[in-house]
Amino acid sequence: MTELSPATSVPSVAAGAPARGSLRELMQLGTPIVLTQLSTTLMGIVDSAFVGRLGAAELGAVAFANIWSWTIFSLFLGSASAVQTFVAQAQGAGDEPRCGRWAWQGLWAMAPPTALAAVAAYFAAPALLPGFLHFVGSAPELTAPAIEYIQPRAFGFLALGMIYVWNGFYRGVGMTTVPLLAGLIANLANVVGDYALIFGELGAPRLGIAGAAIATSASEFLDAAMLFGVAAWPRIRARFATQPHPPDAAAFVRLLRVGLPIGAQWVFDALSFAVFTLILAAMNAQSVAASHAFIMLVNVSFMIALGVSGATQTLVGRAVGAGEPQLAVTALMNGLIAALSVSTALAVALTTVPELLIRIFTNDPDVLALGVGVLQLGAVFQLLDAAHIVAMGALRGAGDTFWPAAWQTVLAWGVFVPSAWLLGVHWGYGLTGAYAGGTVYVALLAGGLLLRFASGRWQQLNI
C-alpha cells in the first residue's frame, strides 16, 4: 500500500497561528465541533416537537425507534469515526495528500455494510418489531407508528455514515467550521421538511410520522452532499487529494483495526444505557421523569466535553504523526482544563439551585424531590464523565481504541447495570441509588482511561 505509506516531512506553524497543542488551538478546533453537536441535538428536538403534535403514541414511537436504530447503526458510525485519527496523524506527519485518501477508504469501508443494514431494517421491521416491542413491555399502540417511522428513517443512517467520515476528515485537518455550516443548513431543511411532510403543507402530501423520518433522512443526505461538495473544491482537492480513490484492502484492515473497537463500544454503551432506562422504568414514572430532567441539564456539559474530545483527538493525532508525544500530553491536559472548567461551573449550579433547575421541566412534587437528590450526585457524575470523554478522545487520537473499548464494556456490564439494579431496585435506594452506581462506574472509567494514557502504551502503537 504505497500511496498510504507514512511521510517524513512535518509542516511548519504559520505566523500568527496558535501554538501547537495549546489551549487556544484546542478551543479554535473544539468550538465549532461543540456547535455541530448542538446542531445535531437540535434536529432531534425539532422532530420531537413536530411529531408530538400528532399524539403521544407517535412521539413515543419516535423516541423508541431512534434509541434502537442508533444502537444498531452505531457499529458502522463508530467505525467510521476512526477516519479522524488517520487523517490527523497524516497531517501531523506532513503528508496532507494522504488525508483525502483516508477519507475515501473510510467511505468504501462504511457505505456497503451500512446500506445492507438499512435495507435489512426496512424489510425486517414489520416482522420483527412487534415481537420485540412486546418483549420489552412497550405499549402496543407504539407498534404501527414505530414501523412507519423506522422504515424510511433507516436509509438516513447511510447518509449519517458519510457525514461521520467527512466530519472526521474535516476535523482531522482542522476545518471544523465546514461540518458546522453544513449541519446548520441541513437543520433548516429539516424544519421545512418536517412542517411540509408531517402536516401536508407547502403543497406536500400529509405523511404524518413517516414524513418526519423522510424529512430527517433527506436533510442528512443534503448534509452529506454539502460535505462532498466542499471536498470537491479545486483548492481542497489540490491540497488534500480529496478526489475519488479506489478501495484499498490493506487500508480497510488498518481502518477496521482501529474503528471496529469504537463501533462495538458505541453499541454496548448504547445497550447498557437502554437497560439502565428500563431499570428506572421498573421503579416508577417519576424516576424516569427526574432522570430525563437531569440528562437534559447535563447535556450542555456533555456536548461541550464531546467537542473538546474531538479537538483533543485531532491534536493528539497530529502530535503522534509528527513524532512528538509530549505535545500529545499537552493536548490532553488542555482538553481536561477546558472540559472540566465548564463542568465545574455546572456542578456549582447543580448543587446550589437544584430545585430551581428541576422546575424548568416540572412542578410535580414527587419528581422535584427525586430530582434534587439526583442533581446533587449528578454534579460529581458529570465532572467524571467530562474527564472520561476527553481521555477517550486522546486515546483515539493515538489509535489506542481496543483497550478503552474493552474497559468501558466490562465496566458498563459489570458495574453500571448491576449496581443500578442492586442499589436502585433490589436494595430500595431508588433513583439516587441507581445514579450512585452510575457515578462509581464513570469514576472507574475515567480513572482507567487516564491511567492508560499516563502509562504511555499508546506510544508503542503503529496503526
Image (cartoon, rainbow, N blue to C red):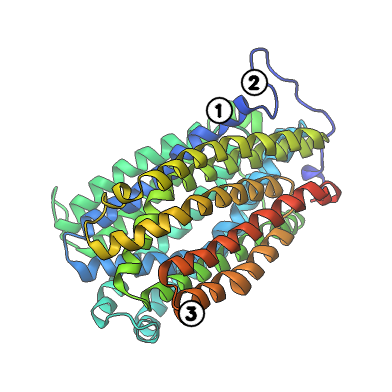
| Amino acid type of the residue that numbered disc 3 sits on in the rendered structure | Trp
Give how far across and how far down residue 284 sits, in percent.
32, 75
Relative to 282, say whether 225 is above or below.
above
| Amino acid type of the residue that numbered disc 1 sits on in the rendered structure | Gln
Choose between 169 and 409: the one closer to the eye.
409
Name the residue located 31 percent from the left edge and 61 percent from the top edge: 369
Classify mark 3: residues with Cα within 10 Å, few (<14), some (14-19) or many (20+). Answer: few
Mark 3: secondary structure? loop
Mark 2: secondary structure? loop
Residue under label 1? 28
Residue under label 3? 427
3D distance between C-alphas at marks 1 and 3: 47 Å
Residue under label 2? 18
Relative to 351, say whether 284 is above or below.
below
3D distance between C-alphas at marks 1 and 2: 9 Å
Tag 1–tag 2 contact (CB < 8 Å)? yes
Give how far across and how far down residue 242 sits, in percent.
61, 38
